[in-house]
Image (cartoon, grey):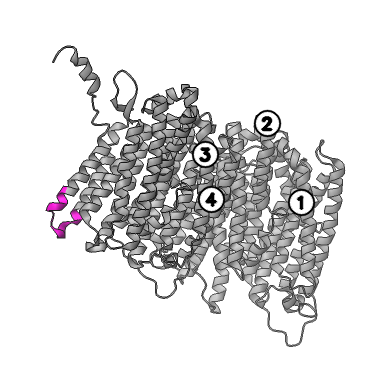
């Protein structure tokens, strides 16, 4: 090798910090291992695959620990600070949320797969779930637009397959198709936005975009602006923000329940972390463009979601899942509020922290609610809200926990963490001076209380007829107790998650 | 009065707030061996009596240990950081304004627990249709107690909000599960109204906290609104005021109250009227008056106007209900009378003078005692006759309670005259001081307007007297028919539950200084620049 070629090679070959990228990588490796192992494992021992996946997710989450000390970046362009992958506090928190959420969804899946017998192909199921989780874990760490889109697609594509995984189930495949078509459209729009941004700034690295987009040629100004707005679309879709929400109810009902739980938490995390990266990191100078857009989106999303949830009839089949689906749309609205507020406030990181804190609370309690719904769904396959009537009489602990989760989602004591998570969101929006959005959200909180409390009250009513005693398989018990302990611990010490609202994340 | 060391006082105050919560959790667990009692129902109700009793003793100890020479000083204070991210501190403390309310809350809850316990004992002899289990009842009542005590003891705006919200769920379930006719509707109305109010209040609290940089009530009160611009104060007072006005309730935001009272079980009504409504007026005095005086100054005349409309409206509604053939419900009537009484409280606060605010605080306590007693009495009447409908009760001539159950009739008449503000009983001083305050409002408030308000409110007292006397005539008097059905007179346990209220009503009426001596220095200080 000549002496001239050496610096060239050094600038092309990037050093890789394997520890920094370990969490998503391990998840992906386990995904492949499970897929291969599926070929060699006897039918009787297929459940082994599930436990390997659960262990893999837990190990990935544990790999976050050594990264806590300082920020690490890798895949950097030499000589600049432009990196494709950064493991800072924001990344770690979202990765914890994603991997923890996937872990809980995996626990729910173990039982769901066992109950389904041969209807669900186990090897593919675990492979898809883990790949999607790997993509979702990669997304918060990506710091260039290309990696961001790749991560978004890695997280989404397996999810389409998972939604439609029930062979021969018409509803399931219809839901998958709906989900697929609308998602692909959104991603395509996003890609077009990114190409506009690239055209006007000639870089894909977020920090460089942020720098150069301020000095865009006057002729390209409109192009850059359009690019900013279009880029947001793909992520807004994943967050299930209105008007990109219509896939949610049917998809949640059509998908296996654990997948609905997974989408409601991890899918949303993908969406809003992408939105945060794009808005706050890449386009801070265009806050006057995306700020009002996101504020309007947030107001619409929470209103439509909550009104939709309010209109669910308790006696209709799958009304419990439908209600959770619509309410998750409403909750997505609350998640968007601080991001919108970041556009108006001097302290954008504080606002972003409110979203992160709210998302952590939401992940724990929403997965808890889904876990209890999974238990009830085992004996009452239609999973109507009326099926929860009198749950307290036979399973007092499960009923109390579900009541706790629902009240956390509603934000009322005894769900103290839910209350304070809402308070942080409110304080972000009041601090930014967005009075109207605060009032819209206040009204929404009241609407949401109505349906959450209606469900809660039903749990404690006298049962109609002979109450069904629900059985609790070990994985479901583990999931419920994990989320329950989390929720109660956080209610006693809300600082554990709310600290993210007070410190610098990036 | 007696010397209790500061650390014990701190512990007592913390215990008063946390104790009922622990008790509520314990109530849901199965009774330990040795405490099983005659039946699970009896055991859990007894548990309720024990816990509320211990809390009452702790509150009385607090009251005794309270330094009565310096009631304006915050005492038994605890100040620990809880959520640094939101700057929320567990800051507890009592002064002359909160102490009487703490005692009232602990007392009323204890009496309610006692009443429920003995009522169950009594009914065991005469079996009735089984209602929902008392386990949840006791747990909810204890959570309710904890929430109300906390809201009077905390000195942090966000904790106040938390305490404010904490009572919603228990009260909802108390009404929705143990209530009478129309309970589902009433419970929804109650919780949606108050929640909407309190969320709006949260926005105001956050605005204050963010602009002033602290949520600490003591610091904010000492600052006396100097670090808040007038426009911020105006917006904050509007938002917080709406939340508190819904709770109080102020006309025209009162419409949840009559339904809730009518549908609620006896104990629920007593606690709702006696304690929960006070959280609203307490918030006005503790938060709005000292923290945003300029903002409140803008709204004071409007508040006063709404207050006197409430007084007149409440009285007229009561008169209409008391009329023969109006199918008036006694509980609904007392609920409307509460709207009137709380009107006096709000009028007193809106004068922004020590006289008016002291009157308001006095009327607060008096209303808690008297209305609590009245709801107990009406509940007892309902247990005996099966109805609270005035027309059904009175029929043509009158229910003739004096003849059928003289003690019950006497007590009802006592409650009624106390409620109409007879001099010598508790109801008198608060209303009179509120009117005095309105006669000479704070310097820069329009005096002619307040004189008008005073005149209207004084007319309201006449109307109050009118409907209360109509009620007494229709329920207590009348000819006793020959074959009158047997009506049990006051049972011993009912005496036990009601006597403290009667005694305190008389005591507060004859010796108002006991209460005013506590509140006055604290009020003086709040109005002139915060607590020490």
- Residues under labels 2 and 4: Cα distance? 33 Å
Q: Nearer the viewer, mark 2 or mark 4?
A: 4
SS type, badge 2:
loop
Q: Secondary structure at mark 4?
A: helix
Q: Point out which mark residue A303 bears.
A: 4
- Indicate whether residue A211 is drawn in magenta: no
Q: Are marks 3 and 2 on the same chain?
A: no
Q: CA distance from mark 3 to mark 4?
A: 16 Å
In the displayed structure, does residue B202 sit left or right of residue A192? right
Q: Chain of mark 3?
A: A
Between circles 1 and 4, the one closer to the viewer is: 4
Q: What's the mark number on residue B229?
A: 2
Residue A58 sits above or below residue A278 on the image: below
Segment colored magenta: A36-48
Q: Earlier in the sequence, mark 3 or mark 4?
A: 3
Distance in Å between CA atoms under marks 1 and 4 = 35 Å
The N terminus of chain A - image quarter: top left
Q: CA distance from mark 3 to mark 2?
A: 30 Å
Above or below for A226 versus B488: above
Residue indicated by mark 1: B307
- Tell me, yes or no, whether the two marked residues, 1 and 4, touch with CB atoms within 8 Å: no
Identified at 42% across, 36% down, the residue is A231
Q: Say left or right for B237 vs B187.
A: right
């Amino acid at each position: 090798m000549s002496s001239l070629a050496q610096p060239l090679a050094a600038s092309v070959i990037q050093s890789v910090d394997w520890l920094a990228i370990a969490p998503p990588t391990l998840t992906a490796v386990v995904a492949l291992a499970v897929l291969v192992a599926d070929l060699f494992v006897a039918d009787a021992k297929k459940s082994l695959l599930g436990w390997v996946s659960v262990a893999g997710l837990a190990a990935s989450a544990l790999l976050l620990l050594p990264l806590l000390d300082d920020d690490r970046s890798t895949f950097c362009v030499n000589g600049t600070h432009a990196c494709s992958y950064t493991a800072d506090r924001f990344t770690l928190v979202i990765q914890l949320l994603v991997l923890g959420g996937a872990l809980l969804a995996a626990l729910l899946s173990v039982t769901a797969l066992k109950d389904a017998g041969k209807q669900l192909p186990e090897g593919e199921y675990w492979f898809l779930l883990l790949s999607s989780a790997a993509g979702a874990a990669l997304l918060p760490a990506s710091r260039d637009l290309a990696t961001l889109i790749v991560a978004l697609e890695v997280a989404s594509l397996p999810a389409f397959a998972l939604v439609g995984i029930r062979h021969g189930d018409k509803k399931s495949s219809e839901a998958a198709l709906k989900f697929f078509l609308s998602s692909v459209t959104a991603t395509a729009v996003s890609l077009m936005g990114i190409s506009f941004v690239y055209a006007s700034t000639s870089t894909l690295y977020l920090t460089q975009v942020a720098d150069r987009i301020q000095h865009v040629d006057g002729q390209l100004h409109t192009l850059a602006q359009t690019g900013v707005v279009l880029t947001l679309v793909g992520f807004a879709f994943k967050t299930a923000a209105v008007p990109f929400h219509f896939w949610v109810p049917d998809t949640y009902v059509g998908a296996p329940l654990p997948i609905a739980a997974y989408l409601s938490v991890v899918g949303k995390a993908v969406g809003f972390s992408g939105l945060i990266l794009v808005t706050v990191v890449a386009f801070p100078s265009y806050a006057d463009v995306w700020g009002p857009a996101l504020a309007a989106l947030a107001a619409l999303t929470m209103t439509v979601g909550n009104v939709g949830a309010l209109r669910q009839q308790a006696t209709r089949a799958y009304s419990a899942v439908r209600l959770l689906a619509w309410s998750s749309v409403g909750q997505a609205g609350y998640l968007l509020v601080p991001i919108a507020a970041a556009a108006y406030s001097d302290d954008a990181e504080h606002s972003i922290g409110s979203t992160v804190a709210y998302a952590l609370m939401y992940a724990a309690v929403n997965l808890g609610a889904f876990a209890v719904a999974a238990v009830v769904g085992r004996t009452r396959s239609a999973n109507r809200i009326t099926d929860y009537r009198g749950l307290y009489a036979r399973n007092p602990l499960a009923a109390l926990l579900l009541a706790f989760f629902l009240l956390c989602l509603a934000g009322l004591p005894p769900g103290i963490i839910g209350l304070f998570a809402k308070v942080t969101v409110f304080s972000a929006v009041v601090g930014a001076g967005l009075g109207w959005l605060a009032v819209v959200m206040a009204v929404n909180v009241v609407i949401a209380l109505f349906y959450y409390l209606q469900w809660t009250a039903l749990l404690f009513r006298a049962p109609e007829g002979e109450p069904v005693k629900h059985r609790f398989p070990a994985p479901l018990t583990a999931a419920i107790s994990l989320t329950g302990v989390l929720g109660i611990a956080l209610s006693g010490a809300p600082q554990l998650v709310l600290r993210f609202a007070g410190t610098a994340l990036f | 009065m007696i010397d209790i060391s500061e650390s014990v006082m701190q512990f007592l105050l913390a215990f008063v707030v946390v104790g009922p919560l622990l008790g509520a959790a314990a109530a849901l667990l199965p009774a330990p061996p040795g405490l099983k009692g005659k039946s699970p129902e009896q055991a859990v109700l007894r548990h309720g009596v024990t816990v509320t009793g211990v809390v009452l003793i702790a509150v009385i100890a607090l009251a005794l240990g309270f330094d009565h020479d310096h009631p304006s000083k915050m005492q038994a204070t605890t100040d620990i950081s809880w959520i640094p991210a939101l700057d929320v501190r567990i800051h507890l403390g009592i002064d002359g304004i909160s102490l009487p309310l703490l005692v009232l809350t602990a007392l009323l809850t204890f009496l309610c627990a006692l009443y429920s316990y003995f009522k169950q004992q009594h009914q065991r002899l005469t079996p009735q249709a089984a209602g929902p289990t008392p386990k949840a009842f006791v747990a909810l009542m204890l959570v309710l107690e904890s929430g109300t005590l906390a809201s009077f003891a905390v000195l942090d705006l966000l904790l106040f909000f938390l305490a404010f919200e904490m009572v919603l769920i228990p009260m909802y379930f108390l009404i929705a599960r143990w209530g009478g006719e129309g309970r589902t509707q009433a419970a929804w109305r109650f919780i949606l109204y108050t929640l909407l109010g309190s969320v709006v209040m949260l926005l105001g609290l956050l605005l204050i906290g963010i602009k002033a940089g602290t949520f600490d009530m003591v610091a904010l009160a000492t600052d006396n609104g100097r670090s808040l611009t007038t426009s911020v104060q105006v917006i904050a007072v509007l938002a917080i005021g709406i939340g508190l006005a819904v709770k109080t309730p102020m006309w025209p935001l009162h419409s949840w109250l009559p339904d809730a009272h009518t549908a609620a079980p006896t104990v629920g009504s007593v606690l709702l009227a006696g304690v929960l409504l006070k959280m609203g007026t307490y918030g006005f005095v503790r938060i709005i008056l000292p923290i945003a005086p300029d903002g409140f100054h803008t709204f004071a005349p409007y508040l006063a106007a709404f207050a006197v409309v409430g007084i007149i409206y409440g009285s007229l509604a009561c008169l209409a209900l008391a009329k023969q053939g109006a199918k008036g419900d006694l509980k609904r009537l007392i609920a409307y009378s509460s709207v009137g009484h709380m009107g006096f409280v709000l009028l007193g606060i809106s004068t922004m003078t020590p006289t008016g605010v002291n009157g308001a605080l006095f009327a607060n306590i008096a209303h808690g005692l008297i209305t609590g007693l009245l709801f107990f009495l009406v509940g007892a009447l309902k247990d005996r006759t099966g109805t609270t409908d005035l027309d059904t009760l009175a029929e043509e001539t009158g229910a003739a309670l004096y003849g059928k159950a003289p003690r019950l009739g006497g007590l009802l008449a006592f409650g009624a005259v106390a409620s109409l503000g007879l001099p010598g009983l508790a109801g008198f001083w608060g209303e009179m001081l509120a009117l005095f305050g309105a006669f000479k409002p704070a310097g820069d408030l329009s005096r002619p307007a307040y004189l008008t308000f005073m005149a209207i409110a004084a007319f309201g007292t006449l109307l109050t007297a009118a409907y209360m006397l109509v009620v007494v005539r229709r329920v207590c008097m009348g000819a006793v028919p020959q074959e009158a059905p047997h009506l049990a007179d006051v049972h011993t346990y009912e005496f036990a539950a009601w006597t403290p209220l009667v005694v305190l009503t008389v005591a507060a009426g004859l010796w108002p200084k006991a209460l005013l001596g506590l509140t006055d220095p604290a009020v003086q200080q709040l109005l002139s620049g915060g607590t020490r």
